[in-house]
Amino acid sequence: MLAVASPAIAAPTALLAHVLAAHHAGKIIKTFPGPAGLTGVVMDYNGSKAIAYLTPNGKYLISGLVANLDNGHNMTNEYGLKYIGKMDILKGPAASRIAFQCASLSGITVGNHAAKNYMIAVFNPSSPLGYKVMGAMMGEAGQMQKKGALNVMALKLVPIGPLAPSILSAGNRGREDRLLNVLHHQSAGVTISLGSRFAARNNTVLSQIPMKPPFLVIYFPQANMEAAIPIHNLMRVGSAVGSAEVLAKGMQNPVGEPR
């Protein structure tokens, strides 16, 4: 049981602590006052820590990006640095190099194929975490499409592992269908030599990248933002996608321009 000094904090965390324990999904290791009445929560799952937020009644958990719209600060990132410490996220030139390497990977592209800004997800759908990342990213792709984010950016899904040759043995739309089949535990389809070559080339490129899948790459040169993010849990997926959506919205509605 988490021991905290304030009853106001203890009450909203009780339900979350129970749910986490019941589903073996980790534990709460710290709480802190969040913005606008939210309770910030630091959660740990097998050594991987993440920031989330609880509503005042403790019934709703919010994960992902929380931004201060007055100054544009990424509050989740700031809380992470304060309460977790330096995260293993690469930014700047190191992230740019990874983005450049990943741009050549074969995968499934969703959104504006000609966009200069893109987000890449690399995962092994045959592994438990990779399968979850695949499902989360496919769901996020649909939401990003509805919000218009994919009008100014592209999202590339790059499968690796034993199913990759079959998934990549089709055109872009066919690959999307095959990935959906894998999500539904159905056959990925027939493998052809071209798909095997695409998968082998991906493996060669990835062997030269100092980050193990699953990971995400955000490359937004038009917003001066590059980041390579290792994925230890799905909260990081939500946070990364939230950041990409904010950047995309900023390019759709630049400050000072009429909407």
Image: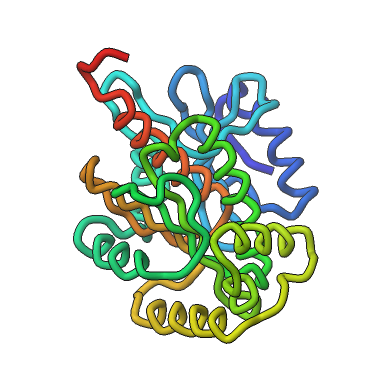
Q: Is residue 54 above or below residue 136?
A: above
Q: Is residue 122 left or right of residue 75?
A: right
Residue at image location 36% in from the left, 59% down from the top: 228
Colour scheme employed for the rendering of this structure = rainbow
Residue at image location 70% in from the left, 41% down from the top: 17
Q: Who is closer to the viewer here, 92 or 45?
A: 92
Q: Position of residue 63 (x, y in %)?
A: 55, 38
Residue 165: name its quadrant. Answer: bottom right
Q: Is residue 136 left or right of residue 37?
A: right
Q: Who is closer to the viewer here, 144 or 18?
A: 144
Q: Position of residue 38 (x, y in %)?
A: 52, 24
Q: Who is closer to the viewer here, 125 or 74?
A: 125
Q: Is residue 95 above or below residue 115?
A: below
Q: Who is closer to the viewer here, 64 or 197?
A: 197
Q: Is residue 11 above or below residue 63?
A: above
Residue at image location 33% in from the left, 28% down from the top: 252
Q: How many marks?
A: 0
For the N terminus, the image quarter is: top right
For the C terminus, the image quarter is: top left
Q: Position of residue 107 (x, y in %)?
A: 50, 65
Q: Position of residue 47 (x, y in %)?
A: 54, 62
Residue 178: name its quadrant. Answer: bottom right
Residue at image location 56% in from the left, 65% down from the top: 171
